[in-house]
Image (spheres, rainbow, N blue to C red):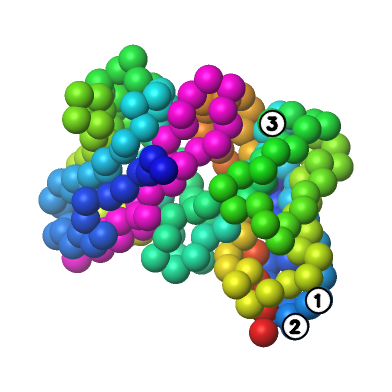
Amino acid sequence: GESVGLHLPTLSVQEGDNSIINCAYSNSASDYFIWYKQESGKGPQFIIDIRSNMDKRQGQRVTVLLNKTVKHLSLQIAATQPGDSAVYFCAENPGGSNYKLTFGKGTLLTVNP
Amino acid sequence: NAGVTQTPKFQVLKTGQSMTLQCAQDMNHNSMYWYRQDPGMGLRLIYYSASEGTTDKGEVPNGYNVSRLNKREFSLRLESAAPSQTSVYFCASSGQPNTEAFFGQGTRLTVV
């Protein structure tokens, strides 16, 4: 079956550095992608989303890039802070009337002070 | 504005017992979802309700049933709990297709 996966299960960065978390997807019909942040003991929290008609979308300190040619999604966090330490999930929706978000396994981001 | 509220937060069951996980949202969302999260894995969809009055199976529906009681509430029932159902369960809701889903804080269920 088709799936969403992550290249790196863990990422450790220094406070103030930029972080890049990657995600590969295999469903070419997916037309909507989301990044979630999950802190320990909490539910996933929406960070940013992007639709397949876009290549890039920026939020506050975060940027999502979508490369449909190679089916790759990335989340960039600028000036990473200790509060950014969490597990980050990408999720895709195959589109149409399908409501089923498919989640990747997650990347643990650790920010060292 | 509470968002998505799940009860209980923690539960221990014996094998074969039944229980219902409750979920309510106050955002007037049409769609609601139940996911499970196991260590080292992403969230997997158990059941979803695209709109009030409809429910559909997700990726891992076996051993579960759901009820969309009204627009606000979506419950998940384990009729005969098994150790393989030990997991963290998340309820979520979304307003429209292809928009972000908002998650509850989760229910940590242990089946012994």
Q: Indicate yes or no whether the magenta region holds residue B88.
A: no
Amino acid at dot 3: Ala
Discs 3 and 1 lie in a common subunit? yes
* Residue B94 in which image quadrant: top right
* Residue A97 against residue B92 in the figure, above or below: above
Discs 2 and 1 lie in a common subunit? yes
Amino acid at dot 1: Gln
Quadrant of the rendering where the C terminus of chain B is positioned? bottom right
Q: Residue tagged by mark 2?
A: B14
Mark 3 residue element: loop
User: Residue B3: x, y in percent?
Assistant: 66, 43
Q: Is residue B73 left or right of residue B9?
A: right
**Looking at the rendered structure, which numbered label has been put on residue A36?**
none
Q: Residue tagged by mark 1?
A: B17
Q: Earlier in the sequence, mark 2 or mark 3?
A: 2
**Residue segment shown in magenta:** A87-113
Q: Is residue A27 left or right of residue B32?
A: left
The numbered mark 3 sits on a residue in which chain? Answer: B
The answer to whether marks 2 and 1 mark residues whose Cβ atoms lie closer than 8 Å is yes
Q: Residue tagged by mark 3?
A: B50
User: Residue A10: x, y in percent?
Assistant: 24, 62
Discs 2 and 3 lie in a common subunit? yes
The answer to whether marks 2 and 3 mark residues whose Cβ atoms lie closer than 8 Å is no
Alpha-carbon span between mark 2 and mark 3: 32 Å
Q: Earlier in the sequence, mark 3 or mark 1?
A: 1
